Image (tube, coloured by chain):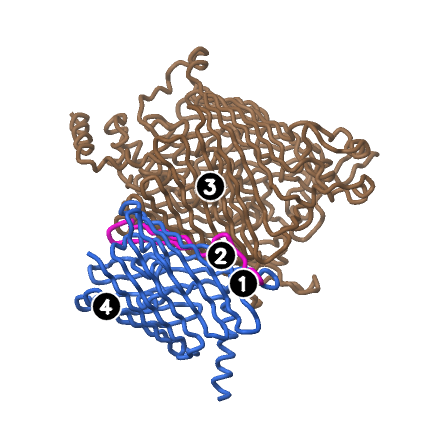
């Protein structure tokens, strides 16, 4: 009976067009906005050392656009992981399904508690309503017939000549080995992926970065001899993955490249970290467990095998990874055959002699497991893993890095929990490390090898949601795969308190804000004393109507760095603050989409120096319905006093790619992006972007120096879907 | 005598800082509303954002005079003629800043088109001429300006305008001096039938920082308007009145600068047609 009434209600809603909202807006615009917001904030944060992996983030979103999530399956948890819905919305979805059975229409989402128009327009393009067929049998013939194949080829290049590609004589190169790139300035990527109902996935990726050697190169024999067995031809990076999910008791299995994410990321979390998110469940993370690694990124991933088995409330994962990683070898002691490395390289670039000699220098092996127990509202998990390096890591001694990981072996373990019921969600993780090679200093001083994160989200009313989190990462907490919430990318020697709020004070208005107060309990690089700071964020957004949305965003971040005293020993930490205000408005007129953005950035040092930056732009996109092509264009002006007051602005790009250039100096930035669906399943993307400076005659420095006032980048991509 | 000379020198110097002044917002209404003009409609839109003249349905002629700080040497004169045609609206414009000793002249040919109620696009081709008095010759340049307006809701109108988007240079100058690029965007919000608020942001590549503007207009009686506004960088407070009688509209404005004093702007528009 309930079902019948519901159906009538839904149908009548459809008739009275209110529920048409969902149908109307199955465009990816709203989703795109969320993505842009995330990428821009991550870029803003990346001033430290964090190598954020935007490409992976993009891949996840785009993957679900092509392979939507069934609202009637357990995959809805992916929406939570993508930060598109909050933990409360996820619970409400499950509750709705328990009471009313499976979804019949997408429009029913509007009746689920906490699903407003905004959420609907965001998730609409990546969900669908279907029978939960996750229990269906998988046969090879079905896999062959219904599997989706995708082949992607991409070329990109900076068109201006860069100094690193200048011709050079062997003797000059030998004298300064890192003064030239050995390869050509193009980037090539070739990727193949196969997907059968998100359950069976496979693929490979080949990549050559700009400056890396390819099938042809002009490297002389002397240089070849110098490089020895590091001299390779062809693609520099080769990766592959095989992945299966939900096959009886095998909940997930991966072979090749994969990502691991458990608990709150304090013990094991490779790949993407979302930073300080405000939307949805805020700080609380939802690990994906074992997931395939499909992007071409060359760091922070596992290569080997992993399997997750599940039965009843239990789930267990074991994994093993064995891969060569880039490292800087410093000492090779021929007597006892001991090798030492001074650092692990994470850029993935192998362009100069130095970089090539560092490439795949040592073997990294990781073995470990995760065990979890989940009942209706509660989940607890335990993670344990051990890492071996084939050569001992011996950092260049410095005060700030004396408690960092050194040696050959490291063991980590952690316990995580989650409790979500009604208006409350509690989460946390505690972890510790054992380093048998640990320096005597750490033991003698009795420094903390523990790290902990605890938090809660509360939703006292439908329009209000706030999150409180506290973290304390010990001075000597060492972990090579930790990627938990925090300031900067290192989960070590940090304490902090976070409060985030999301309020919808009136229809069509939304406020997101957070404050994060943090303290580094030990020195960090370029800060010669324990330091502290804060990060405030406020975003006020409003939709005037379905086609017009605007937001105002204010951010203020204060941290410490060394004063610029000429004499090293008399430097001391001073505060610096970066404030930024941004206004953004999006509107569309039939097939045209427009966007205006204006940003002001202000950078202030405690010693009194100041700098300012401005950015202003107009975007025009033409996306005709029922036509096989679309175009987008940007025109932007920027004017900043220096690099500190730089502005980041997300730019639309070819599929699966991203660009968030840091703009500084004075000049203009333009790009034109075209998409053309040549035939049904073959799409061509091309993009040309140009930055023209008004205040300089040469751009960049060192190997990337360009003589002239303009820098042009070109990308061409072909995507073939079967 | 010395004092005014000094003042003029100072002002001319400050103008050099401001670089060229081809793209000052024109019209008594814009002047009274802190310079807000990018989301405005009407004849003067031809000079401020050509998209705004797309909907003009009357043959219109406008004359504008601005006397900056009561100095004849810094007078700003402008004239515009709009001719609605079947395929949009055509316009001719002329601006002059300065005196016989130094003047900046702009000649424009404008065209704007209405793409339904939501979107208007405008374009103006410009010929610029700088006259440096008897002994120092002339410099000229050709460029264009582009504008866009969109009535996104009944109450909200958005506008964007770019002058010289591809950065043309002034010919006959020593080092091929660049013309400024000017980028504005802003909105007009119709709070009630008789009350309008506007705000906009402007970036001029030859000036430090950006300029923010805000303005209000209240129709106190039928066809009688009271206006006020504010602009930053340079900081100005502005006030004005407007009155419309049959085919003539007169707009008067005053702008106050805390150091340089007051400027007066007067604009008249004659419209003939339906």
Residue corresponding to mark 2? B142
Q: Secondary structure at mark 4?
A: strand
The Cα atoms of the two marked residues, 3 and 1, are separated by: 28 Å
Image quadrant occupied by the C terminus of chain A: top left
| Left or right placement of residue A223 versus residue A716 in this view | right
| Nearer the observer, A254 or A655 | A655
Mark 4 and mark 2 lie on one chain; the one further toward the N terminus is 2
Graded by Cα atoms within 10 Å as few (under 14), some (14 to 19) or many (20 or more), the crowding at tag 3 reads: many
* Residue A262 appears in the rendering: no
| Nearer the observer, A362 or A701 | A701
* Residue B71 appears in the rendering: yes
- Residue B225 is tagged as 4
Total marks drawn? 4
Graded by Cα atoms within 10 Å as few (under 14), some (14 to 19) or many (20 or more), the crowding at tag 2 reads: some
- Residue A449 is tagged as none
Please give the letter of the chain rendered in blue.
B
The Cα atoms of the two marked residues, 4 and 2, are separated by: 37 Å
Indicate whether A99 appears above or below B198.
above
Give the colour in which the image draws chain A.
brown
Residue corresponding to mark 3? A652
Q: Secondary structure at mark 3?
A: loop
Q: Quadrant of residue A312?
A: top left
| Nearer the observer, A650 or A356 | A650
Q: Which residues are magenta?
A: B145-172
User: Is residue B149 magenta-colored?
Assistant: yes
Q: Secondary structure at mark 1?
A: strand
User: Is residue A657 magenta-colored?
Assistant: no
**Closer to us: mark 3 or mark 2?**
2
Graded by Cα atoms within 10 Å as few (under 14), some (14 to 19) or many (20 or more), the crowding at tag 1 reads: some
Residue corresponding to mark 1? A611
């Amino acid at each position: 009976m309930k079902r019948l009434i519901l159906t009538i209600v839904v149908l009548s809603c459809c008739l009275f067009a209110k529920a048409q909202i969902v149908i109307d807006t199955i465009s990816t615009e709203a989703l795109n906005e969320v993505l842009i917001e995330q990428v821009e904030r991550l870029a803003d944060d990346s001033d430290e050392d964090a190598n954020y992996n935007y490409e992976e983030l993009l891949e996840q979103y785009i993957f679900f656009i092509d392979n939507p999530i069934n609202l009637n399956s357990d995959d809805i948890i992916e929406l939570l992981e993508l930060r598109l819905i909050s933990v409360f919305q996820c619970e409400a979805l499950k509750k709705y399904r328990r009471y009313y059975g499976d979804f019949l229409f997408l429009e029913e989402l509007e009746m689920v508690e906490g699903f407003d128009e905004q959420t609907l327009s965001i998730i609409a393009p990546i969900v669908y309503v279907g029978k939960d067929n996750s229990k269906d049998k998988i046969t090879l013939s079905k896999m062959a017939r219904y599997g989706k194949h995708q082949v992607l080829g991409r070329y990109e290049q900076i068109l201006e000549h860069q100094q690193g590609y200048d011709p050079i004589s062997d003797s000059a190169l030998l004298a300064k080995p890192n003064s030239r790139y050995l390869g050509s300035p193009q980037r090539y990527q070739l990727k193949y992926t196969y997907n059968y109902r998100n359950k069976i996935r496979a693929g490979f990726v080949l990549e050559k970065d700009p400056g890396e050697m390819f099938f042809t190169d002009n490297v002389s024999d002397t240089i070849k001899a110098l490089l020895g067995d590091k001299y390779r031809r062809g693609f520099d990076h080769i990766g592959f993955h095989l992945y299966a999910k939900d096959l009886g008791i095998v909940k997930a299995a991966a072979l090749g490249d994969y990502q691991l994410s458990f608990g709150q990321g304090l013990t094991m979390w490779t790949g993407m970290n979302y930073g300080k998110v405000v939307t949805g469940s805020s700080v609380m993370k939802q690990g994906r467990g074992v997931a395939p690694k499909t992007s071409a990124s060359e760091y922070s991933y596992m290569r080997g095998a992993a399997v997750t088995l599940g039965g009843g409330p239990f789930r267990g994962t074991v994994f093993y990874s064995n891969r060569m990683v880039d490292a800087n070898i410093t000492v090779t002691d021929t007597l006892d055959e001991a090798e030492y490395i001074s650092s692990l390289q994470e850029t993935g670039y192998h362009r100069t002699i130095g970089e090539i000699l560092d490439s795949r220098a040592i073997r990294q092996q990781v073995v470990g497991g995760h065990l979890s127990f989940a009942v209706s509202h509660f989940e607890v998990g335990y993670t344990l893993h051990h890492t071996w390096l084939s050569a001992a890591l011996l950092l260049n001694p410095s005060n700030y890095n004396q408690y960092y990981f050194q040696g050959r072996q490291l063991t980590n373990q952690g316990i995580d929990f989650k409790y979500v019921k009604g208006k409350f969600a509690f989460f946390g993780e505690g972890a510790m490390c054992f380093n048998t090679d640990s320096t005597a200093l750490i033991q003698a001083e009795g420094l903390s090898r523990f790290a902990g994160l605890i938090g809660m989200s509360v939703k006292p009313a439908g329009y209000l949601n706030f999150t409180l989190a506290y973290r304390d990462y010990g001075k000597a907490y060492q972990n090579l795969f930790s990627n938990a919430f925090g300031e900067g990318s290192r989960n070590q020697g940090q304490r902090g308190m976070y409060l985030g709020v999301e309020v919808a004070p009136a229809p069509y208005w939304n406020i997101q804000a957070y404050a994060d107060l943090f303290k580094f309990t030990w020195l960090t690089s370029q800060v010669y004393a324990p330091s502290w700071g804060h990060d405030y964020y406020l975003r006020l957004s409003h939709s005037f109507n379905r086609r017009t949305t605007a937001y105002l965003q204010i951010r203020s971040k204060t941290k410490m760095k060394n004063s610029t005293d000429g004499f090293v020993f008399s430097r001391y930490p001073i505060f610096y603050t970066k404030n930024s205000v941004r206004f953004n408005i999006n509107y569309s007129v039939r097939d045209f989409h427009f966007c205006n953005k204006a940003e002001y950035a202000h950078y202030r040092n405690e010693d009194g120096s100041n700098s300012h930056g401005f950015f202003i732009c107009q975007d025009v996109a033409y996306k005709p319905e029922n036509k096989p092509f679309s175009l987008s264009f940007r025109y932007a002006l920027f004017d900043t006093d220096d690099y500190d007051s730089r502005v980041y602005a997300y730019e639309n790009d070819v599929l699966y790619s991203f660009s968030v250039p840091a703009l500084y100096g004075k000049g203009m930035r333009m790009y034109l992006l075209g998409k053309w669906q040549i035939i049904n399943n073959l799409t061509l993307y091309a993009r040309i972007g140009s930055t023209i400076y008004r205040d300089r005659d040469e751009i960049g420095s060192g190997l990337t120096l360009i003589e002239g006032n303009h820098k042009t980048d070109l990308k061409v991509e072909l995507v073939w879907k079967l | 005598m010395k004092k005014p000379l000094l003042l003029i020198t100072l002002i001319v110097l400050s103008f050099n800082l401001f670089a060229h002044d081809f793209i000052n917002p024109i019209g008594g209404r814009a002047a009274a509303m802190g310079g807000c003009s990018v989301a405005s409609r009407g004849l003067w839109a031809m000079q401020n954002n050509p998209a705004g003249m797309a909907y003009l349905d009357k043959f219109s002629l406008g004359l504008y005079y601005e006397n900056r700080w009561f100095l004849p040497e810094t007078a700003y004169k402008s004239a515009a003629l709009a001719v609605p045609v079947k395929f949009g609206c055509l316009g001719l414009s002329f601006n002059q800043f300065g005196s016989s000793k130094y003047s900046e002249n702009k000649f424009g040919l404008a065209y704007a088109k209405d793409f339904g109620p939501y979107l208007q696009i405008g374009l103006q081709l410009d010929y610029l001429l700088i006259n440096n008095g008897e002994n120092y010759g002339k410099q000229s340049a050709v460029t264009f300006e582009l504008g866009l307006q969109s009535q996104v809701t009944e109450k909200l109108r958005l506008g964007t305008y770019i002058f010289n988007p591809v950065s043309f240079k002034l010919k006959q100058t020593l080092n091929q001096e660049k013309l400024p690029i000017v980028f504005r965007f802003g909105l007009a919000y119709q709070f009630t039938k008789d009350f309008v608020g506007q705000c906009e942001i402007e970036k001029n590549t030859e000036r430090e920082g950006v300029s923010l503007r805000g303005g209000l207009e209240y129709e106190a009686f039928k066809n009688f308007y009271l206006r006020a506004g504010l602009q930053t960088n340079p900081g100005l407070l502005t006030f004005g009145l407007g009155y419309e009688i049959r085919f003539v509209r007169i707009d008067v404005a005053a702008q106050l600068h805390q150091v340089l004093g007051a400027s007066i702007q007067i604009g008249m528009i004659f419209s003939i047609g339906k």
